[in-house]
Amino acid sequence: MGPLPTKKRVVVLHYSPIAGTVDGEAPEIFPFLGTSRLAEVVDRHGTDLIIHGHAHHGKLDGRTTAGIPVHNVAITLLESRSPAVYRVFEI
């Protein structure tokens, strides 16, 4: 990931790299929804945006410890909004 010569980077994950976007889920399943080890790698190598799903009852947005934006795009979470939403990100 480090030597990629692109101007912009987007990391797409199934699991959450931070606890902030799984907040709202049952605490006993947190270990099955993601790990901060993912954020450690991304923070070390850099990216402009992280998108993940899987946390169906979590929060929409958060940041890694390095300040990289993290967005939860789990369809169940998006459909729970009234009206249902989709997300567009500008990087």
Image (cartoon, grey):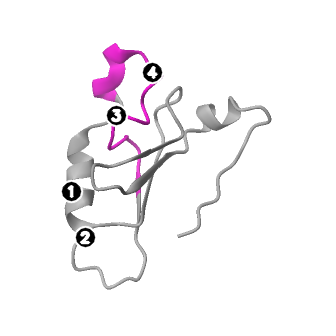
Q: Residues within 10 Å of mark 1 (few under 14, many from 20)?
A: few
What secondary structure is the stretch in magenta mostly built from? loop
Spatial CA distance of label 3 from label 1 is 15 Å
- Can you identify the residue that label 1 sits on? 41
Q: Is residue 59 left or right of residue 23?
A: right
What amino acid type is highlighted by mark number 2?
Met
What amino acid type is highlighted by mark number 1?
Val
Mark before the other along the chain sequence, 1 or 2 = 2
Whether tag 1 and tag 2 are in contact, CB under 8 A, the answer is yes
- Can you identify the residue that label 2 sits on? 1
Helix, strand or loop at disc 3? loop
Q: Is residue 27 above or below residue 64?
A: above
The range drawn in magenta is: 12-32
Q: Position of residue 43 (x, y in %)?
A: 25, 58
Whether tag 2 and tag 3 are in contact, CB under 8 A, the answer is no
- Can you identify the residue that label 4 sits on? 25
Identity of the residue drawn at 71% across and 32% down: 81
Q: Is residue 84 above or below residue 71?
A: above
Identity of the residue drawn at 59% across and 61% down: 89
- Can you identify the residue that label 3 sits on? 19
Q: Quadrant of the N terminus?
A: bottom left
What amino acid type is highlighted by mark number 4?
Glu
Spatial CA distance of label 2 from label 3 is 23 Å
Q: Looking at the image, is mark 1 or mark 2 nearer the viewer?
A: 1
Mark before the other along the chain sequence, 2 or 3 = 2
